[in-house]
Amino acid sequence: MPPAAAPLTLDLTADSLAITQAICDAPSVSGDESRLADAIEQALAGASHLEVIRDGDTIVARTNLGRERRVVIAGHIDTVPINENLPTRFETEDGVDYLWGRGTVDMKAGVAVQLKLALELTDPIVDLTWMWYDNEEVASSLNGLGRLSRNRPDLFAGDFAILGEPSNGQVEGGCNGTLRAEVWTTGLRAHSARSWVGDNAIHKLAPALAKLAEYRAETVEVDGLDYREGLNAVLVSGGIAGNVIPDEAVLTVNYRFAPSRSVAEASAFVTEFFDGFEVAIVDSAEGARPGLDDPLAQQFVRAVGAEARPKYGWTDVARFSALGIPAVNFGPGDPLKAHADDERVDVAQIVHTEVALRAWLTGATA
């Protein structure tokens, strides 16, 4: 058995780029976040303006200054598995400086900015609850933010929430909902040399696949933002052996739906779309409306200096939305590089994210 890694020490007085490198170079693949969680807890333990709370490998730090409003700012500390993309390194391409390596985009650069500001902002204009949570990249049942909401729902009190998901340093409001459905067909097994006495279940999927290929998903306006939907086959399974006519086949479909629709409405749409087939909804998650009509959200968008955009993928902003807290995604990094083997973040976006958050939270852009 390899020796345990030495305890990690974080210097949160360093610049946010150095903090990003430090936490990226400390691997924390989902389920193995304890070392990083320990370091975060220790780094904030001496901050007199923060109450530090731990739940598993989720760390919460909050101010209790008696402000009229409270903002929750969250980020996950786990990553997908490493694939020869650590330690971090610097690259320059077309005049742009990048920090390359696993976690730089999704989403440790955003977490690094949050950690630095959590330590330094002793007198923000709103009370702050910072959350750094585990197991975001795996099954929803393991998600540290979900676990925290069950164990300590009181910690989720707030008027506005920001999730540090990569958004190219822009504001992405809300998120699409998602569901997975399985479309089943059945037939009759037979030897493929005598296929006419069987009934091929895979062939029976053809009408469903043809309908999907012809379908053009909608773009739905929600609170001023245009959310592009998607309905796609993502998996086909079936067959017994190379010389047997299959008696069962399953088509797995993913529906990404605008946050104006509920899971119930999305499920009804998919079931009706595949009328005549056996359909089972096997997984789903509600979307989140952008919630940009709140004055805090509007101030934040102005502080960032950009128009809000829609978030097409599902993120944990939906957990806040379900609690009635408007939430947006805001973090450095191109979402298209999340999970990629050449994952890398534009260094300027890290700086921009820190400057924008600091200015807004201190009232410099109020």
Image (tube, helix red, strand yellow):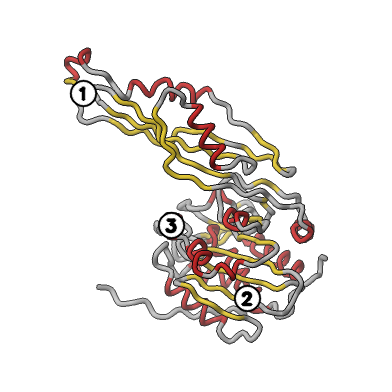
Instruction: Name which quarter of the figure residue 249 lies in.
Output: top left
Is residue 213 found left or right of 173 in the rendered image? left
Q: Which badge, 3 or 1, comes first in the chain's sequence? A: 3
Q: Callout 2: helix, strand or loop?
A: strand
Q: Is residue 89 visible?
A: no
Q: Callout 3: helix, strand or loop?
A: helix
> Disc 3 to disc 1, how far (Cα)?
38 Å
Q: Which mark is residue 62?
A: 2
- x 55%, y 35%: residue: 230
Which residue is labeled 1 in the image?
189
Instruction: Name which quarter of the figure residue 256 lies in.
Output: top right
- x 60%, y 73%: residue: 115
Is residue 204 found left or right of 193 in the rendered image? right
- x 69%, y 62%: residue: 160
Which residue is labeled 3 in the image?
141
- x 59%, y 47%: residue: 287
Q: Which badge, 1 or 2, comes first in the chain's sequence? A: 2
Image position, residue 326 (x, y; %): 68, 56
Q: Residue furthest top?
A: 196
Q: Which quadrant of the figure contains the C terminus?
A: bottom right
Specify the amino acid type for callout 2: Arg
Image position, residue 136 (x, y; %): 48, 59
Is residue 233 found left or right of 249 in the rendered image? right
At label 3, counting other C-alpha atoms closer than 10 Å, the crowd grade (few under 14, some 14-19, many 20 or more) is: few
> Disc 2 to disc 3, how far (Cα)?
25 Å
Q: Is residue 285 visible?
A: yes
34 vs 95: above or below: below
